Image (tube, grey):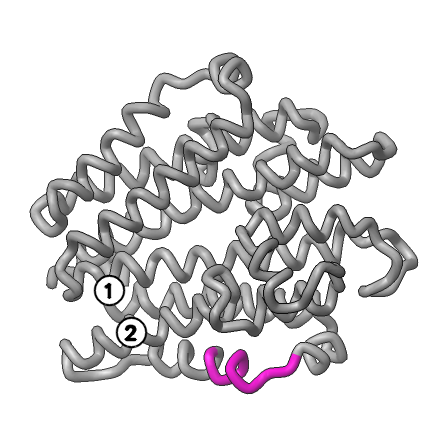
């Protein structure tokens, strides 16, 4: 497969996933904003959304304060923000357009129709429709893309590169969401696992579609350490870091079998996967959860760079 085609497929998967992750982050922030809080706490909540998306440097150039209106404008429809939902869906469409020969017609139609729908949306239209409905629409379009991709694409190199992009992006997002919750939102002077507002933890679980899964595994009481364990170590949880890393290894191994060789990206993916497979949440807390998650985000970024170097156009 040409590296240009692999590059388009990989980034198509990443950008679709990024749009969904942004919708999930905004959704949970919106739900949290409905709870009584001080102005300082509300500002911290919305600033955390900017931090999760990596917009700490660019956001202040466009907005004076982080609140519901400014963060929605920045994260949803800002064409100058490369990580906004608008920009992500536009980039996904452009990548898909470049490899229409490599994907089924249904995949192209799903991606293109999503872009056409959001292309002319305005913030006023989103608010008139309801912001929750907008977030649900983004998640549904992403789910549609995944379902069509899995159900119609040959499970060959094109499929593996698309799925690699999906899980590299998803693992990064889960780590950032969990890190911001512990490191920024936890009240000052209060240790991890202290007397926090448990509604926040439930909202966090809902942001990654894990609330019912959590209750099935751990019961009704929301315990911060168990939330972290679910989102980091439980492989059966579709948005956990362990699950994402297992999928990355699976698709890299499939590519290695097709190409007859392994690269540095295979070693890095296997090393990180082993740490997750045999790790214990208590050890991660002893190390410092923020430090562990920061290390994972850095490892994931390095893995993405190695994948690009070994397979993709810019490698």
Task: Say the numbered circle drawn on residue 160.
Answer: 1
Please state the horizontal and vertical placement of residue 224, each as a whole percent of the image.
74, 63
Please state the horizontal and vertical placement of residue 77, each as a whole percent of the image.
47, 26
Left or right of 177 on screen, residue 225: right
In three-dimensional space, the C-alpha distance between marks 1 and 2, rounded to whole angstroms, equals 8 Å
The answer to which of 65 and 283 lies nearer the viewer is 283
* Image quadrant in which you'd find residue 30: top right
- Considering the whole magenta stretch, tell me its main secondary structure: helix
Left or right of 36 on screen, residue 66: left
Please state the horizontal and vertical placement of residue 283, each as a whole percent of the image.
70, 82
* Image quadrant in which you'd find residue 250: bottom left
Residue 114 within the magenta-colored segment of the rendering:
no
Earlier in the chain: of badge 1 and badge 2, it is 1
Q: Is residue 40 above or below residue 149?
A: above
Which element type, helix, strand or loop, lies under badge 1?
Answer: helix
Whether residue 59 is visible here, answered yes or no, is yes
* Image quadrant in which you'd find residue 214: bottom right
Identify which residue is drawn at 81% across, 64% down: 192
Q: Is residue 297 above or below residue 5?
A: below
1 and 2 marks in contact (CB < 8 Å): yes
The answer to which of 56 and 14 lies nearer the viewer is 14
Identify which residue is drawn at 36% across, 70% down: 248
Label 1 crowd (10 A; few <14 / some 14-19 / many >=20): many
Please state the horizontal and vertical placement of residue 272, each as a whole percent of the image.
48, 78
Identify which residue is drawn at 65% across, 38% down: 29
The answer to which of 211 and 106 lies nearer the viewer is 211
Q: Which residue is mark 2?
A: 252
Label 2 crowd (10 A; few <14 / some 14-19 / many >=20): many
Which element type, helix, strand or loop, lies under badge 2?
Answer: helix
Task: Say the numbered circle drawn on residue 64.
Answer: none
Region in magenta: 273-280
């Amino acid at each position: 497969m040409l590296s240009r085609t692999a590059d388009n497929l990989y980034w198509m998967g990443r950008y679709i996933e990024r749009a969904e992750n942004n919708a999930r982050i905004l959704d949970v922030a919106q739900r949290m904003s409905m709870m009584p809080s001080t102005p300082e706490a509300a500002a911290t909540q919305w600033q955390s959304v900017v931090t999760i998306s990596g917009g700490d440097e660019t956001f202040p150039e466009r907005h004076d304060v982080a609140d519901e209106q400014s963060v929605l404008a920045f994260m949803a429809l800002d064409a100058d923000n490369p990580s906004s939902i608008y920009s992500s869906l536009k980039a996904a469409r452009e990548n898909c357009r470049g490899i229409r020969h490599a994907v089924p017609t249904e995949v192209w139609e799903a991606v293109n129709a999503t872009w056409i729908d959001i292309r002319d949306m305005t913030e006023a239209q989103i608010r008139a429709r309801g912001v929750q409905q907008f977030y649900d629409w983004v998640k549904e379009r992403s789910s549609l893309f995944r379902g069509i991709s899995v159900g119609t694409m040959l499970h060959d190199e094109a499929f593996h590169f698309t799925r690699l992009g999906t899980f590299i992006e998803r693992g990064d997002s889960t780590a950032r969401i969990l890190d911001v919750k512990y490191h920024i939102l936890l009240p000052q002077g209060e240790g991890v696992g202290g007397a926090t507002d448990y509604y926040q933890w439930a909202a966090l679980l809902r942001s990654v579609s894990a609330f019912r899964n959590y209750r099935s595994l751990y019961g009704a009481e929301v315990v911060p350490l168990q939330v972290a364990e679910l989102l980091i170590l439980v492989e059966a949880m579709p948005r956990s870091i362990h699950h994402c890393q297992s999928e990355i290894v699976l698709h890299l191994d499939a590519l290695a079998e097709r190409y007859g060789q392994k690269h540095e990206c295979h070693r890095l993916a296997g090393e990180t996967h082993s740490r997750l497979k045999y790790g214990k949440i208590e050890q991660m807390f002893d190390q410092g959860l923020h430090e562990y998650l920061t290390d994972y985000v850095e490892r994931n970024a390095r893995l993405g760079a190695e994948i690009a170097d070994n397979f993709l156009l810019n490698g």
